[in-house]
Image (tube, rainbow, N blue to C red):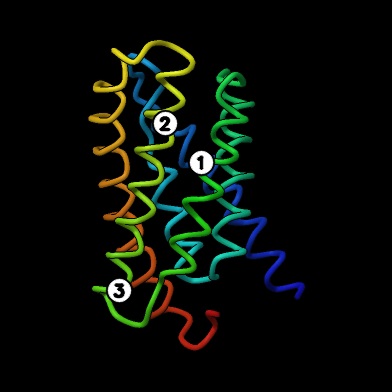
Amino acid sequence: MARKLAFMGVFAALVAVGTMFLRIPGPTGYYHLGDGMIYTAAILGGPLVGGLVGAVGSAAADMLGGYAVWAPWTLIIKGATGYVVGRLRGATLKQNLLAMLAGAVITIAGYAAATAIMYTPAAVVVEIYGNIGQTASGVVVALAAVSLLKRSFPGRWA
């Protein structure tokens, strides 16, 4: 249990840093690499870990980075994303890609809905395109990170 808590703490921090470190401003928010850390945590740790890491790390980044108005949306959207990726993960690359695709759909749809409510439905198209790029970069980051961590520490993952 202590190992899992430490893993969640480290990955929640990595999500926050990945979200805040390389921040590219967009019309309705910003684009970042934090999704890659959410996907990595979910694939290695499962649904509970992925959900908590995604929710806490991403909402913390919004709060600390000046986007507090987005934090409630992010808590739910990224928590659901991490949970679903962890729930759908598998032993093969194909299974994990499909899990991350499902997570990306949640992120894209969730932020599209939030943008329509917070701004205007006209802003949704821009939000969708930005989130496609953001989630795609997250998949690339996660594939590399999962591969590296599994090779470096075999047999240590849930």
Most extreme residue toward the right is 2
Q: Hey, what amino acid is under mark 3?
A: Gln
Q: Residue at x 54, y 35 (%)?
A: 74
Mark sitting earlier along the chain (3/2):
3
Q: Amino acid at mark 1?
A: Ile
Q: Secondary structure at mark 2?
A: helix
- Residue that carries the numbered disc 3 in the rendered image: 95
Residue behind mark 2 = 111
Q: Which numbered disc, 3 or 1, marks the residue that appears first in the sequence? A: 1
SS category of the residue bearing label 1: helix
Q: Amino acid at mark 2?
A: Tyr
Give percent across and percent down for residue 117.
47, 18
Q: Residue at x 28, y 30 (%)?
A: 128
Q: Quadrant of residue 140?
A: bottom left
Tell me how far mark 2 sits from mark 1, CA to CA: 7 Å
39 to the left or right of 6: left
Q: Is residue 2 above or below residue 64?
A: below
Q: Nearer the viewer, residue 58 or 147?
A: 58
Q: Is residue 12 above or below residue 32?
A: below
User: Which mark, by number, is residue 77?
Assistant: 1
For the residue pair 125 and 65, the one nearer the viewer reads as 125
Residue 56 drawn at (x, y percent): 64, 44
Q: Secondary structure at mark 3?
A: helix
Q: Residues within 10 Å of mark 3 (few under 14, many from 20)?
A: some
Above or below, 102 relative to 136: below
Residue 148 position in % (x across, y down): 36, 71
Q: Give the spatial CA distance, label 3 vs label 1.
A: 22 Å
Image quadrant assignment for residue 21: top left
Disc assigned to residue 18: none
